Image: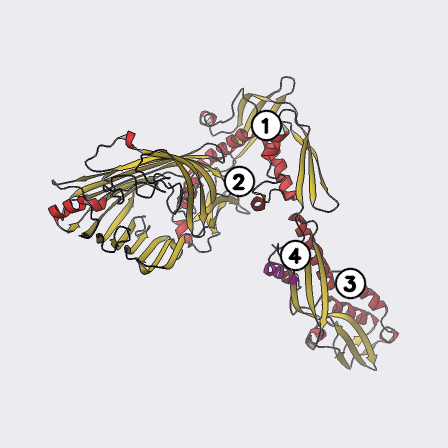
Amino acid sequence: MNFLSNRFRLQHLFVFVATAMVSLSAWAVEPFKLKDIRVEGLQRVESGTVFASLPFRIGDFYNDESGAAAIRALFALGLFKDVRLDTQGDVLVVIVEERPSISQIQWVGLKEFDKDVLNKSLKEVGLSEGRPFDKALADKAEQELKRQYITRSLYGAEVQTTVTPVDRNRVNLTFTVTEGGPSKIKEIRINGNQSFSERTLKDQLNLDIGGWLSWYTKSDRYSRSKLNADLEILRSFYLARGFLEFRVDSTQVAISPDKQDISIVINVTEGDRFVVSNVKLEGNYLGKEDEFKAIVKIGIGQPFNAETVAETTKAFSDYFGKFGYAFARIDARPEIDRLNNRVSLVLVAEPSRRAYVRRINVTGNNRTRDEVIRREFRQLESAWYDGDKIKLSRDRVDRLGFFTEVNIETQEVPATNDQVDLIISVVEKPTGSVSAGAGFSSTEKVAFNFGIRQENAFGSGNYLATEINTSRFNRTIVISTTDPYFTEDGVSRTIDLFHRTSRPYLGDLNAYSLVSSGAGMRFGVPFSEVDRVFFGANLEQTSIRPGTNLPNAYVEYMQQFGYTSTSLPLTIGWARDGRDSALVPSKGILQRFNSDLSLAGDSRYIRTNYQIQHYTPLTKKFTLALNADIGYGQGLSNRPYPLFKNYFVGGLGSVRGFQQSSLGPSNSANTLFLGGARKVVFNAEVLAPFPGAGNDRTLRLFAFADAGRAFAESQKISLTDLRSSVGIGLSWLSPMGPLRFSYAFPVKTQDTDKIQRLQFQIGTSF
């Protein structure tokens, strides 16, 4: 907040009074030549400051006019509250009384605003510790603070300024604030509506009389800016439904005598409803009228809709941009037939001149390096303006997943008619998470765990993750790093190192365990703007250490192939990302295909996985997200599929409402979940903004339906065996990382299924 940024100065009327009251000896003197000048009364101000302000020097002639000018100049410094001139022969004596300096500024009772921000604002106007005290500035600051409290619906707030003298001509300045309770909206009335009910219109407004979430949304707090925004929403609501001549006649805001209750009355005139009778194109369309007609979104015979008109003009502007016309103007001129309530729209286009991009500027990236953003740009500097490339560039930057907002603005270059600058502004989000902890139990004793994951390590765009866990049941050391631009052409490189020891958490330290170690490297080669092919190799070794509770499937595997299996799987994959955002997508398709093929070593197998996610915007606020994830594993060379490569289904990330990894083959007692060589998972979500969060995409609600299961290699995949659930959840891009909470209602279950209705997770989208 910088509400004191405009400097203000009180015109010291008493300067003129002081000038008029100067002793007659200073005024009624005959001009004389100055032999000396003395200054008296200085405490902190340097004498040189006074001498530099005087309009005369030793040796000059002194008269009445030069004396008056000297007094005005010294008062103008703002350092003195009194200035007098005295003459002693041919010596001039300047007698000053300094203003007290501010020793300390204190705030009492401040809750709504941050005192450091207020102190910074005061400093910008000259009211800070060590500066001369100016009561006019202090009074102005007090009044401005009261006004700011009113904007936050705290009409009863009182601010009192106290000036306390201290030693050495200093003062302490104290602002005592009594904030009181906020004034709340108790009534909203809309008059003049006929086609829509008052309740329907109130539902469009952000201001309301309060509800169970008002403590968070503050929707019952009045401010003029909020009301103006709601009036625009109301106007857009009518214009989108054919009421071309709708207007807001007046608004009345009344506050109760105790300044606690606010009433709002909105008076409107709806006017008649108009239907679009025709759409005509006029102007210069570069000889591509048919192409422009194909992107018209205005429906003839439908009620006039200002939103579709705006979408059409924007589509026209974007299409002109495709050919380099950055300054194209498209005007929608309505021709109204009030007799028949018809309107004909004339779209007049003026492409203006073709332009090229002079410079691309990046703002808002406090942590991320410029090059990380610029290397995603397909629009180049000193190249012709291309609307399609600019949109593609914006989407590529958004798909990085480092930013909550990515916007591109076009600015004309002064004194030119064919150049533009592109301003890309981003809002960074936390891209890393750190976890550290220690635990103690009778079975595990002391266990430490530490993990760090950074998707944008040191602002370089590289991915870095480390995980360490010293639990007796799950010991892990994992290091993974990805350089998305290993080469300048965008070939990525990923290196993985891992060592894991896991045993079933049954409270038995003598239970069997799996120990796996390995390393791998893979590269990703971009084949198009949305397609990338991956290939690489891994070296893995997995050992089965016998113990209690060892499942029969593991016993049979050891008897046939031994305790230790070594494999050298080759990896090939493909990904196509056509989403508009990697963080919170609202449209587009993401596809992933990955296959591991091991033809050497003790384990011979093929493991293939395909996933597709489809995002469709239902409205501006609601998005439908569909996901399918299918995995298939098969043993090769007459060898069974290795059990330690099984897929697991159940819980967040697959089928919510069931215990994690529990949907699939298990031991006879149903206490150990073994996973399966095949998996089938389907998900559907409808995402909506959190009530009161506005356009904030980091906090959303969703309703979901899930189905899926894992199958053993010997089992036949049957959709009738899938488990399913429905439920609701909350998604939050928190500083700790993406958080997802869900509460599920299992629909199709079996008696042996492990139900877990409430679940939460940090990580995956589905």
Q: Quadrant of the C terminus?
A: top left
Quick one: label 2 or label 3, which is nearer the N terminus?
Answer: 3
Which amino acid lies under the numbered mark 2 shown in the image of this protein?
A: Pro
Where is mark 3, residue-wise? 12
Where is mark 4, residue-wise? 4
Q: Position of residue 33 (x, y in %)?
A: 80, 79
User: In terms of secondary structure, where does tag 3 sit?
Assistant: loop
Which amino acid lies under the numbered mark 3 shown in the image of this protein?
A: His
Which numbered tag is attached to residue 691?
2
Quick one: label 4 or label 3, which is nearer the N terminus?
Answer: 4
Q: Position of residue 528 (x, y in %)?
A: 32, 40
Nearest to the observer: residue 759 or residue 619:
759
Gap between marks 1 and 3 measured at Cα: 56 Å
From this viewpoint, is residue 525 visible?
yes
Quick one: label 4 or label 1, which is nearer the N terminus?
Answer: 4
Quick one: label 2 or label 4, which is nearer the N terminus?
Answer: 4
113 in the magenta segment: yes
Gap between marks 2 and 4 measured at Cα: 33 Å
